[in-house]
Amino acid sequence: MAQRLACGRLPGLGRPSPIRPRFLPLLLVLPTFIVLLAITIFPLLYTATLTVFSWELTTKASAQFVALGNFGRILFEDGRFWNAMRNTTLLVVVGVGLQVILGTGLALLVNRLRRGRTLIVSLILIPVMIAPVVAGFQFRMIYNDQFGPLNDIIQFLTGGLWRGIAWLADPSVALIAILIADVWQWTPFMILIVLAGLQAIPDELHEAARVDGASARQQVWHISLPLVLPVIVVGILVRMMDTFKLFDIVYQLTAGGPGSTTETIAYYTYLQGFKFFSLGYTAAMAVIQLIVITIVAKIFLGYQKRMQRRGSL
Amino acid sequence: MTHSRWYRVGIGLVVIALSTTACGGTASPPPSASAGAAATAPQPLDVIKWETPLSFGGVTVNVVGDAGHNLKPYEFWKDDFTKAGITIKITEVPFEGVYEKLKTEFVAGTGAFDVVTFYPAYIGDYASNGYLEPLDGYLTKEPAAVWGANQDDVLPPFRELYNKWAGKTYALTIDGDVHVMIYRKDLFENADEQAAYKAKFGTELRPPETWADWLQVGSFFTRKKGEKLAGQTLDHDFYGSAEFAKRGFSFAWFVDRWASSGQVYFDDQMTPQINTPEAVAGLQNFVDSLKNAPPDVRAYGYDELRDALLKGNVAMVVQWTDVPKKGADPTQSSVAGKLAVGRVPGTLINGQVVHRAMMPVGRVVAVAADSKNKDAAYWVAKHIAYDRSLEDVSTSLTGLDPYRTTHLEHPEAYTMFADKAAAETYLGGLKAALADGFPEIFIPGAAQYEDVLDLHVNKALAGEETPQQALDTVAAEWQKITDSLGRDKQIELWRSALAGYRALGLIK
């Protein structure tokens, strides 16, 4: 056995290696594969297995095989699941949309600065550096009707004519309050990645456009935005996946209320998993979410690939 | 101004907005930080006699509980633990997150905690699954001055319901929660207000006896900024009442209204009784009461509800019994000396008003079955639950409420009140509330049953469902939960719980 292993030779090295060259790559990826197996593949397979069982940890009863019963209950009987999906979709579409618009606009402005850009970018990034749970607590204070500054400012600006809004208590506003908090926290992330994209655009392109008489607006529309679009697509994808999992701010601000108006899919999954300990049901919900996120990611990555083929990148 | 100047100004404003919010957000004090934030301990009282054991030899005892003022006793009595050779390490979890945190650790068998603090509605879940150490052996250990917890002194509902499961003691009470009505006596005693009330309704102005009165009195005291209240011109809107209407425990404020009808959660076959006409009427009353409450009342939890009263924004609330103590403390309350305690309103049945006061939350401490320092953990739990308990419940620095006969017999300990008579009045109100006490659902699955109830009560409060729709849905969901947990087992456990409630006089 030792003789057989000794016949290999590492490239670039004079002495023979004890490992056959064709096994070497396998050997090198093995540690990574083992780690991935332990922390990703095994939990994924275990979760997939759990989906076909009803397993209530509240009692001592053992897991019962229910085939696709959990999926059936979720998709056809659980109104709370669909309500949470609706809320999450709204946060993803409107929230990420706003982050893209604001982030891109501000990145274009910051990109024009000649001095102090680093300092301003550092300051703008502060919200991203704050833990979401802390941001949630902060907004709970800001929105508070008795102590919070927001309604005070509204009253001041309207000369006392309008006392503001019950931000977290009004069922028609609470989700918007969460959306504002999320947009506040993550718009700087969009600024950062769009700014990085803008800075990668060669100055020569703008110089040539200027020589040809293009205005600043024309340069933005016909040079900056088309060239930075692939970066924006990646930013949208990252933010969509992240917003789909929005939990901390909801937990801190409303706990899903009033009623179920702000219950997101991540919060509902948390309740099923860690409050009710319905493991099979929670696993099925998690798998459905994984499928949804994977489909969305595929669409965006496909779009990006098409752009690359067209030579936009 | 040139274009470049405009965008520099714009960027400046954005940066200032983002960074100032991030670095401070609000200059106002957080609503919950005020209560009991001081690190000073209450004065030791020489009422309960106890002795320090021989040293445990420098062990660390890991304690977990809901964050905030109710973990203060471990700081107050740090020196006691040091003398006993114990170092306390505290893990704080959010108020609403206790169940899941403990359950997760128990299921995983991490052994992360020695002393666990939880809400007693979960004792069935934790004890029946073997997560808690039975304490009967420790309670009888000698010498009694070191190990005894004098359980006979604990008021029966807290001792039997909070501490025991299947006849064994698994936990020790540290917080005897029950609802009580707290109102602004200065407003009810004001001659102008009394005359105005009589002129409007033809009856005397009195603290509400029934839930119908609650709505009437609440609407009477609800005033706009600029109107007069007790002879003073209001510089802010004032509200007749406020409620705990945030998700989490809002169901308890519904149960206050419904339980006086004489019904309980399930019949003895586990058929839900939650959507009866009486229950629907109770929830409708809750919904109607929001008209007399601050506009953001649906975001009110414990802190906000307490502060609404203590900052002089509302005339009356139903709250836990620690709030009158905080309300009497001028450092925490702008209405000190103006509050009084009364029975939670009731329902008129056959010419008589029946009162029921919900006993939501409460707190117990227990020793985790997988603790590696069980003796030390038990002593820590017992030290908080008994030795230092009078100090802990008689201070306004904690939110802990009396639960022992000793606590009710020492009004002089409650020094936040103006005098001993005021303390006696408070304790009298508390005794009356305990006599009206109505329990939570004390069987495994309590977290699920109560979450569904809370969600749909909250949906009714938010106008997403009518009270009838909300409670019909709860009934249907409860049936599903019972089926998923095993109907026969649940029926057996519920019958046992019912027998316990009846024996304690909690249901008639």
Image (cartoon, grey):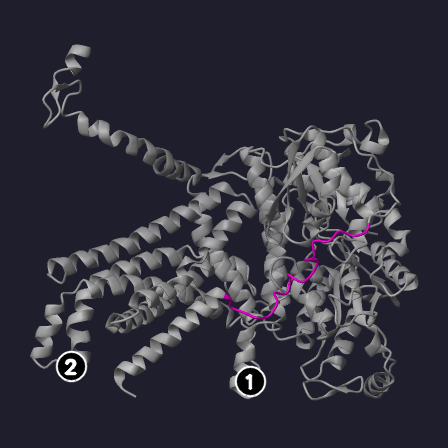
Residue A100 in picture, x, y percent from top left: 31, 67
The residue stretch that appears in magenta: B24-43
Give the residue drawn at x 82%, y 72%: B338
| Residue type, mark 1 in image | Trp
Provide the chain ID for the residue under circle 2. A
Which residue position is annotated with label 1?
A162
- The numbered mark at residue B333 is none
Give the residue drawn at x 88%, y 45%: B46
Tell which tag, 2 or 1, sits nearer the viewer.
Answer: 2
Decide: few, some or many residues near mark 2? Use Cα within 10 Å; few <14, some 14-19, many ≥20.
few
Residue B84 in view: yes
Which residue position is annotated with label 2?
A215
| Residue type, mark 2 in image | Ser
Q: Describe the element under mark 1 as helix, strand or loop.
A: loop
Q: Quadrant of residue B217?
A: bottom right
Q: Quadrant of residue B107?
A: top right
Provide the chain ID for the residue under circle 1. A
Earlier in the chain: of badge 2 and badge 1, it is 1
Residue B173 in picture, x, y percent from top left: 76, 44
Report the quarter where the N terminus of chain B lies.
Answer: bottom left
Give the residue drawn at x 69%, y 60%: B35
* Viewer-closest of A107 and B206: A107
Residue B142 in picture, x, y percent from top left: 84, 26
Residue A1 in view: no
Q: Quadrant of residue B179?
A: bottom right
Residue, far front: A115
Query: Per the image, is A80 magenta?
Result: no
Residue B344 in picture, x, y percent from top left: 80, 64
Cα distance in 3D space between marks 2 and 1: 43 Å
